[in-house]
Protein backbone atom coordinates (compact mmCIF):
# COMPACT_ATOMS: atom_id res chain seq x y z
CA UNK A 1 0.00 0.00 0.00
CA UNK A 2 1.24 3.46 -0.90
CA UNK A 3 0.85 6.19 1.72
CA UNK A 4 1.99 9.64 2.70
CA UNK A 5 4.26 11.80 0.61
CA UNK A 6 4.92 9.03 -1.93
CA UNK A 7 1.19 8.78 -2.66
CA UNK A 8 0.93 12.55 -2.82
CA UNK A 9 3.83 12.79 -5.31
CA UNK A 10 2.36 10.09 -7.53
CA UNK A 11 -1.06 11.73 -7.56
CA UNK A 12 0.43 15.20 -8.18
CA UNK A 13 2.63 13.93 -11.04
CA UNK A 14 -0.32 12.13 -12.61
CA UNK A 15 -2.47 15.26 -12.50
CA UNK A 16 0.32 17.71 -13.40
CA UNK A 17 3.02 16.08 -15.57
CA UNK A 18 6.35 17.90 -15.55
CA UNK A 19 5.84 19.41 -19.03
CA UNK A 20 2.51 20.95 -17.95
CA UNK A 21 4.13 22.39 -14.82
CA UNK A 22 6.93 23.86 -16.95
CA UNK A 23 4.34 25.38 -19.32
CA UNK A 24 2.67 26.99 -16.31
CA UNK A 25 6.02 28.42 -15.26
CA UNK A 26 6.46 29.85 -18.76
CA UNK A 27 3.03 31.50 -18.59
CA UNK A 28 3.91 32.98 -15.20
CA UNK A 29 7.19 34.25 -16.63
CA UNK A 30 5.32 35.94 -19.46
CA UNK A 31 2.85 37.58 -17.12
CA UNK A 32 5.59 38.83 -14.79
CA UNK A 33 7.38 40.31 -17.78
CA UNK A 34 4.22 41.99 -19.09
CA UNK A 35 3.56 43.53 -15.70
CA UNK A 36 6.95 45.27 -15.86
CA UNK A 37 6.18 47.01 -19.18
CA UNK A 38 4.78 50.52 -19.47
CA UNK A 39 1.87 51.28 -21.81
CA UNK A 40 4.02 51.80 -24.91
CA UNK A 41 6.08 48.72 -24.11
CA UNK A 42 2.90 46.67 -23.76
CA UNK A 43 1.62 47.93 -27.11
CA UNK A 44 4.92 47.11 -28.82
CA UNK A 45 4.91 43.66 -27.20
CA UNK A 46 1.44 42.84 -28.49
CA UNK A 47 2.22 44.24 -31.94
CA UNK A 48 5.04 41.69 -32.18
CA UNK A 49 2.97 38.93 -30.55
CA UNK A 50 0.17 39.14 -33.10
CA UNK A 51 2.67 39.25 -35.99
CA UNK A 52 3.72 35.71 -35.08
CA UNK A 53 2.52 32.64 -36.91
CA UNK A 54 -1.17 32.25 -35.94
CA UNK A 55 -0.47 28.69 -34.75
CA UNK A 56 1.85 30.11 -32.09
CA UNK A 57 -0.23 33.00 -30.77
CA UNK A 58 -3.51 31.10 -30.98
CA UNK A 59 -1.91 28.08 -29.32
CA UNK A 60 -0.50 30.30 -26.58
CA UNK A 61 -3.83 31.98 -25.87
CA UNK A 62 -5.62 28.63 -25.77
CA UNK A 63 -2.84 26.88 -23.78
CA UNK A 64 -2.40 24.19 -26.44
CA UNK A 65 1.33 24.59 -27.06
CA UNK A 66 3.92 22.16 -25.79
CA UNK A 67 6.82 23.47 -23.77
CA UNK A 68 9.07 23.26 -26.84
CA UNK A 69 6.57 25.28 -28.85
CA UNK A 70 6.46 27.88 -26.05
CA UNK A 71 10.23 28.22 -26.31
CA UNK A 72 9.90 28.66 -30.09
CA UNK A 73 7.23 31.30 -29.48
CA UNK A 74 9.63 33.21 -27.23
CA UNK A 75 12.42 33.07 -29.79
CA UNK A 76 10.06 34.10 -32.61
CA UNK A 77 8.63 36.90 -30.49
CA UNK A 78 12.09 38.29 -29.87
CA UNK A 79 12.80 38.08 -33.60
CA UNK A 80 9.59 39.92 -34.54
CA UNK A 81 9.91 42.58 -31.86
CA UNK A 82 11.03 46.13 -32.54
CA UNK A 83 14.39 47.20 -31.13
CA UNK A 84 12.77 49.16 -28.25
CA UNK A 85 10.69 46.07 -27.43
CA UNK A 86 13.79 43.86 -27.50
CA UNK A 87 15.49 46.28 -25.13
CA UNK A 88 12.47 46.03 -22.81
CA UNK A 89 12.70 42.23 -22.94
CA UNK A 90 16.42 42.23 -22.20
CA UNK A 91 16.17 44.68 -19.31
CA UNK A 92 12.89 43.57 -17.73
CA UNK A 93 12.95 39.79 -18.25
CA UNK A 94 16.00 38.67 -16.24
CA UNK A 95 14.33 38.56 -12.80
CA UNK A 96 11.23 36.65 -14.01
CA UNK A 97 13.48 34.40 -16.11
CA UNK A 98 15.64 33.51 -13.10
CA UNK A 99 12.48 32.84 -11.09
CA UNK A 100 11.13 30.53 -13.82
CA UNK A 101 14.37 28.58 -14.18
CA UNK A 102 14.71 28.28 -10.39
CA UNK A 103 11.16 26.97 -10.04
CA UNK A 104 11.71 24.48 -12.84
CA UNK A 105 14.96 23.29 -11.25
CA UNK A 106 13.27 22.83 -7.88
CA UNK A 107 10.43 20.98 -9.57
CA UNK A 108 12.77 18.42 -11.10
CA UNK A 109 14.61 17.67 -7.86
Image (cartoon, rainbow, N blue to C red):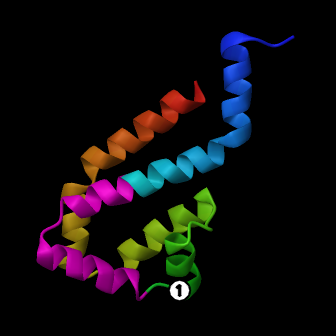
Q: Disc 1 on helix, strand or loop?
A: loop
Q: Is residue 38 above or below residue 96?
A: below
Q: Quadrant of the C terminus?
A: top right
Magenta stretch contains residue 38: yes
Q: Position of residue 102 (x, y in %)?
A: 41, 34
The answer to whether residue 54 is seen in the rendering is yes
The answer to whether residue 17 is seen in the rendering is no
Badge 1 density bin: few <14, some 14–19, many ≥20, Cα 10 Å: few
Q: Is residue 89 above or below residue 83?
A: above
Q: Is residue 42 left or right of residue 8?
A: left
Residue receiving disc 1? 53
Q: Position of residue 69 (x, y in %)?
A: 59, 66
Q: Nearer the viewer, residue 84 or 37?
A: 37
Residue ID at (34%, 83%): 48
Residue ID at (27%, 49%): 94
Magenta residues (range): 29-51
Q: Quadrant of residue 84?
A: bottom left
Q: Is residue 72 left or right of residue 1?
A: left
Q: Main secondary structure of the magenta part?
A: helix
Q: Is residue 44 above or below residue 34?
A: below
Q: Nearer the viewer, residue 106 or 72?
A: 106
Magenta stretch contains residue 89: no
Amino acid sequence: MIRGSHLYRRAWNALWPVEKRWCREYYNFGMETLLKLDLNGTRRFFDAFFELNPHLWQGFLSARLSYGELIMLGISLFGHASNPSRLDMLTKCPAPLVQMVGNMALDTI
